[in-house]
Image: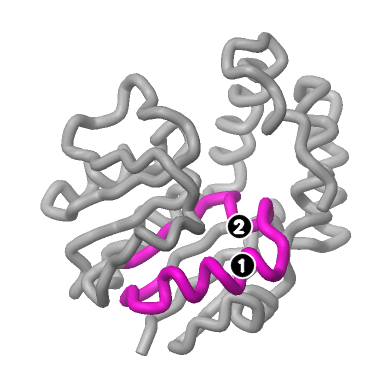
């Protein structure tokens, strides 16, 4: 897989700071976080939400504020970010760590995260979280349409994002691909958004 430049930059590198700002704008435009927050309500049995690749904690914060009764667990390789709600549990480590175990009362959410993994890693991720009650994933849709929207944004984003955005789209998914790779059994439903997002919901059985 082609690496993304942002992953190799120090957090205080000006290029990284600019890129994170670009990503916040792209997230807003794609609407993946909004969709995930709304869709959590469809899992009435859930008591825990596990946010994989939580990054700056924006999605975890939004879920906790919308559903204060839920236990929100955020997983990321980096340390707990400033501004994270105090009620959120932050687990610093690899999402593929075998020590992470959650039951049927938990759902996994991932926003623009899974496309960083290869097929074997996604299979491993599916095995690691095979006992959860559901998944909500928003990933780049690997399509000509998404590439078109990406190219339109190139003049308005920094140099790192100009590279990483196109890499992310090419590393994205088409409908039914995640189901086959992750191998999670259940009721899968998927939709492609206007601005190049693939939204996948899984109710596990």
Task: Tell me: 5 left or right of 125.
Answer: right
Read off the residue under disc 1: 122
Residue 65 magenta: no
Question: Which disc is residue 90 wearing?
Answer: none
Q: Are marks 1 and 2 in contact (CB under 8 Å)?
A: yes
Residue occupying image coordinates x 79% and y 41%: 3
Task: Tell me: 181 left or right of 46.
Answer: right
The secondary structure type at the circle numbered 1 is: helix
How far from the left and from the top, in percent, is residue 70?
A: 17, 55
Could you tell me how far apart the alpha carbons at marks 1 and 2 are, in whole angstroms? 7 Å
Q: Depth check: 65 or 181 in front? A: 181
How far from the left and from the top, in percent, is residue 174?
A: 73, 71
Magenta extent: 107-134
The secondary structure type at the circle numbered 2 is: helix
Residue occupying image coordinates x 84% and y 37%: 152
Residue lying at the far left of the rendered structure:
69
Q: Please tell me whether residue 35 is drawn above or below residue 199 in the rendered image.
A: above
Question: Which disc is residue 114 wearing?
Answer: 2
Of callouts 1 and 2, which one flags the residue occurring earlier in the amino acid sequence?
2
- Quadrant of the rendered image containing residue 62: top left
Foreground: disc 1 or disc 2: 1
Residue occupying image coordinates x 30% and y 71%: 42
Q: Quadrant of the C terminus?
A: bottom left
Q: How many marks?
A: 2
Residue 109 magenta: yes
Task: Tell me: 194 left or right of 69.
Answer: right
- Quadrant of the rendered image containing residue 118: bottom right
How far from the left and from the top, in percent, is residue 22?
A: 65, 27
Task: Tell me: 2 left or right of 192.
Answer: right
- Quadrant of the rendered image containing residue 109: bottom left
- Within 10 Å of disc 1 (Cα), the crowding (few <14, some 14-19, many 20+) is some
Residue occupying image coordinates x 59% and y 50%: 112
């Amino acid at each position: 897989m082609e690496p993304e430049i942002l992953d190799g930059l120090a957090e205080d590198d000006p290029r990284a700071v600019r890129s994170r700002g670009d990503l916040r704008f792209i997230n807003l435009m794609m609407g993946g976080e909004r969709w995930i927050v709304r869709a959590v309500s469809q899992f009435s049995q859930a008591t825990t939400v596990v946010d994989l690749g939580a990054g700056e904690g924006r999605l975890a914060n939004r879920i906790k504020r919308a559903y204060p009764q839920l236990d929100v667990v955020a997983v990321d390789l980096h340390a707990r970010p400033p501004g994270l709600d105090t009620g959120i549990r932050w687990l610093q480590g690899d999402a593929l760590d075998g020590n992470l175990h959650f039951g049927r009362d938990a759902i996994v959410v991932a926003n623009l995260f899974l496309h960083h993994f290869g097929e074997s890693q996604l299979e491993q991720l599916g095995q690691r979280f095979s006992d959860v009650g559901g998944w909500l994933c928003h990933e780049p849709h690997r399509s000509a349409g998404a590439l078109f929207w990406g190219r339109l944004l190139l003049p308005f984003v920094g140099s790192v994002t100009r590279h990483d955005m196109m890499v992310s789209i090419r590393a994205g998914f088409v409908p039914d691909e995640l189901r086959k790779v992750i191998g999670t059994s259940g009721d899968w439903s998927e939709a492609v958004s206007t601005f190049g997002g693939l939204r996948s919901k899984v109710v596990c059985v």
